[in-house]
Image (cartoon, rainbow, N blue to C red):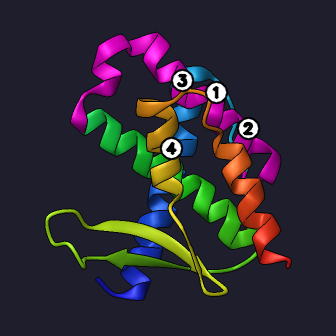
Amino acid sequence: MTQEEITALMADSAQNAINTTREEFQLTLDGSPESIALVDDVLLSWIDRYKDSALEDNMVFTLCNIYGAYVGEVFRHRVGGNWHYDVSDPDAPYVVLEYAGKSYAFAGICYQRLVNDSQVSVKHYFDQAIGNSVQ
């Protein structure tokens, strides 16, 4: 996958998060750093609305990727960076945003909040990433 292709894919995925959030929850993800707090709420709202079906593999994959793309695109537009499609494990490829020698797994933090620990904060992770970028 070329850099242009992964960048376009992640921008499209972020737009999917914006559209889906508006349609499902009547909430607006406006591309601002402040909107990342809504991602924390929306991820848990999927479970409230769809119960166990929200935790099925395909749904988890989709939710984590579109909201991870959204958070990453907010970061990328504010600070910079490039998406990287890592296929070092062909059975488990993943996407990270790379900036200033660091990699940020925004889809991974969404997964942690959705599946493992509802106390994990996507907003906190995002704020730490922003803080790292200005050091």
The residue at the point 14 percent across, 64 percent down is: 91
- Could you tell me how far apart the alpha carbons at marks 3 and 4 are, in whole angstroms? 10 Å
Dots 2 and 1: beta carbons under 8 Å? yes
Magenta residues, as a range?
31-57
What kind of residue is marked 2?
Ala
Q: Is residue 68 above or below residue 117?
A: below
- Could you tell me how far apart the alpha carbons at marks 1 and 4 are, in whole angstroms? 11 Å
**Left or right: residue 92 compared with residue 62:** left
Q: Earlier in the sequence, mark 2 or mark 3?
A: 2
Dots 2 and 3: beta carbons under 8 Å? no
Dots 4 and 2: beta carbons under 8 Å? no
**Magenta residues: mostly which secondary structure?**
helix
> Which residue is identified by label 2?
37
> Which residue is identified by label 3?
44
- Could you tell me how far apart the alpha carbons at marks 2 and 1 are, in whole angstroms? 7 Å
Image quadrant where one finds the N terminus: bottom left
